[in-house]
Amino acid sequence: MKRSIFALLAAGALSATPAIAQNTGSQPQSQTAAPANEAKVELIDAGSGEKREVRYQFKEGQQQRSRMTQKMEQTMSMGGQAMPSMPMPSVIYTTSSKVMGQTEQGHRVESTIENIDVEGQDMNAQMMRQQLQAQAGETTTTVITNRGQTVDQGEQGMSASPIEDMQSGNAVVFPAEAIGTGASWKVTQRFDQDGLVMDMVTTYKLVEIDGSMVTLEIDGGAEVKDATLSQQGMEIQVDSMSLKTNGTVTIDLTKPSPVKGNSTMNMNMEASIDPGQGMGPQKISQEMKMTVVIEPATAAE
């Protein structure tokens, strides 16, 4: 399922609770992506100046390599007791994308995780590196229309996480109408990750368009109340959760992945979990901040 680039960070926030994962001794598990779900697009302002219908212009054989650096900070309490702050090293993903051909519905894009590295040499960084590098070489295939809608998820080899999905094709969905500088539109995408259903609303603003290069500002958010999340063999009762995302992204309409981008996601969650061992249900409060930087990969990476 193709979603807004930065909306994917919201989906990943709930699967990125290392404190819980380490307390249970569980290892990260691959998730199965939900079926493709067409985003709802609403034009707010058509913008000014010369207007055009913005469409992707993929061609078979086009390839692209990207580098994405993810950094996360979080604070957490369980049962009313603050948990020790765990240092979270930066994670660097190198991915490649290739346009494999065209179908009746759109272009088929194949994306591969070439490498995953973790900054630092302490025990936490080494453990994360070992776990994440197992995903290197995994591939996903999507079919994307010329407006950015994903109509077919295809064979899903990767985890359904924001990292993989972010690099599995252009995630920005454009309106059907012609737009100019300053145009804004709202994209509403419903998705289900591990049983948690969320409506993510993202507003895009067209900052600049120069040939095939498009620069956008992005602002999104979602609210969830009284939901159940299945994670690593446990059920987490989510009492409330709020997500806020903002950033900028530059895409080349001829290429299958963003050229560059910079985003921040903030999450606040109140939940209950039974970690076992006779402890009974425990209240969890979590605050998380995630930043993501996308840039072209160098030849050496």
Image (tube, rainbow, N blue to C red):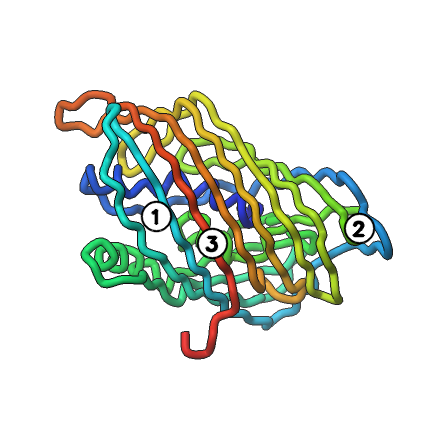
Q: Residue at x 44, y 36 (%)?
A: 267
The residue identified by callout 1 is: 30
Taking the view exactly as shown, the residue that stands out farthest to the bottom is: 299
* 92 lies above or below 61: above
Identity, as a three-letter code, of the amino acid under mark 3: Val
The residue identified by callout 3 is: 292
- Identify the secondary structure beneath mark 1: loop
> In the picture provided, is 24 more to the left or to the right than 237?
left
* 82 lies above or below 62: above
> In the picture provided, is 283 more to the left or to the right than 200?
left
- Identify the secondary structure beneath mark 3: strand
Front one among 195 and 188? 188
**Front disc: 2 or 3:** 3
**Residue 261 rendering spot, x and y as whole percentages:** 55, 58
- Identify the secondary structure beneath mark 2: strand
Marks 2/1: CA–CA distance: 39 Å
Q: Residue at x 35, y 24 (%)?
A: 237
Identity, as a three-letter code, of the amino acid under mark 2: Ile
The residue identified by callout 2 is: 179
**Residue 204 rendering spot, x and y as whole percentages:** 66, 46
**Front disc: 2 or 1:** 2
Marks 1/3: CA–CA distance: 21 Å
Q: Residue at x 28, y 49 (%)?
A: 87
Identity, as a three-letter code, of the amino acid under mark 1: Ser
Locate the C terminus and report the quarter of the image it occupies.
bottom left
Marks 2/3: CA–CA distance: 28 Å
**Residue 2 rendering spot, x and y as whole percentages:** 56, 48
> In the picture provided, is 171 more to the left or to the right than 185?
left
Query: Residue 257, can we see it?
Result: no
Q: Quadrant of residue 95?
A: bottom left
CA neighbours of label 2 inside 10 A, class few (<14), some (14 to 19), many (20+): many
Query: Residue 65, can we see it?
Result: yes
